[in-house]
Amino acid sequence: MNRISALLLCLALLVPPAALAQQASGVEVRNAQATLRDGQWFVSARVDYRFSREVTEALRNGVTITFGLEIELVDQRRWWLDSTVVRIRQESQLSYEPLSDGYVVRNTRTGEQQTFTALYAAVRALGRISELPLVADAELDPEASYEVAIRAALDQEDLPGPLRLLAFWSSGLDLESDWYRWPLRD
């Protein structure tokens, strides 16, 4: 993307604040769970992404959007500060392919990708986290109390320069969920 088209994209994305308030954009972790199988803990989750007009237009104009998923396993200590045992970051990219008029979701760690004809289907796939390895059970203290936390966000650092600047002023490009927390063992 050259500088002129990037500048035009930024100008096209400027929306009056009243219009932004009407859009229900955001990211929310709907549910998550950790399961133990064959001595390994795995995390599965459902994340809802609701895109603003800015994100949708950026996609349609050739900008690849990166989403980060952070997972933490925390040892909750009774008489001392909590300790983060495991911290995982997984990134997925969403892009629009104009020749096929489709959307591609790509896991940046594994390189796996899926293609979809509708943005809705691509966003649903992006929000489906299934059996992500967390930690081996043998590495955990059986007497300790652990909490798992997960959150998802649009990675603004991965946006092209002009959009990164626009993200500073526009809430439509500020997509981040709250931490979703639950005990590892019930």
Image (cartoon, rainbow, N blue to C red):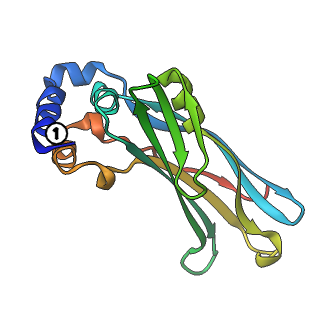
Q: Is residue 99 above or below residue 66?
A: above
141, above or below 63, in the image = below
Name the quadrant of the C terminus: bottom right
> What is the secondary structure assignment of the residue under circle 1?
helix
Looking at the picture, how far across and down is residue 120, in whole percent? 51, 22
Where residue 164 sits: x, y (%)? 21, 48
Residue 113, picture quadrant: top right
Q: Residues within 10 Å of mark 1 (few under 14, many from 20)?
A: some
Above or below, 152 against 123 in this view is: below
Q: Farthest residue toward the front?
A: 99
Q: Can you say which quadrant of the picture contains the N terminus?
A: top left
Residue at image point 57% right, 53% down? 111
Answer left or right for 65 relative to 147: left
Q: Position of residue 24 (x, y in %)?
A: 36, 24
Instruction: Check the image and name the residue furthest to the right.
Output: 38
Q: Amino acid at mark 1?
A: Ala
Residue 112 visible at all: yes
Please name the residue shown 51% across and 20% down the image: 118
Residue 179 visible from this viewpoint: no
Residue visible at 31% across and 35% down in the picture: 62
List x then y, in percent, for residue 115.
56, 32
From the viewer's side, name the closer residue of 151 and 107: 107
With respect to residue 118, does 129 lie above or below? below
Q: Mark 1 = which residue?
A: 6
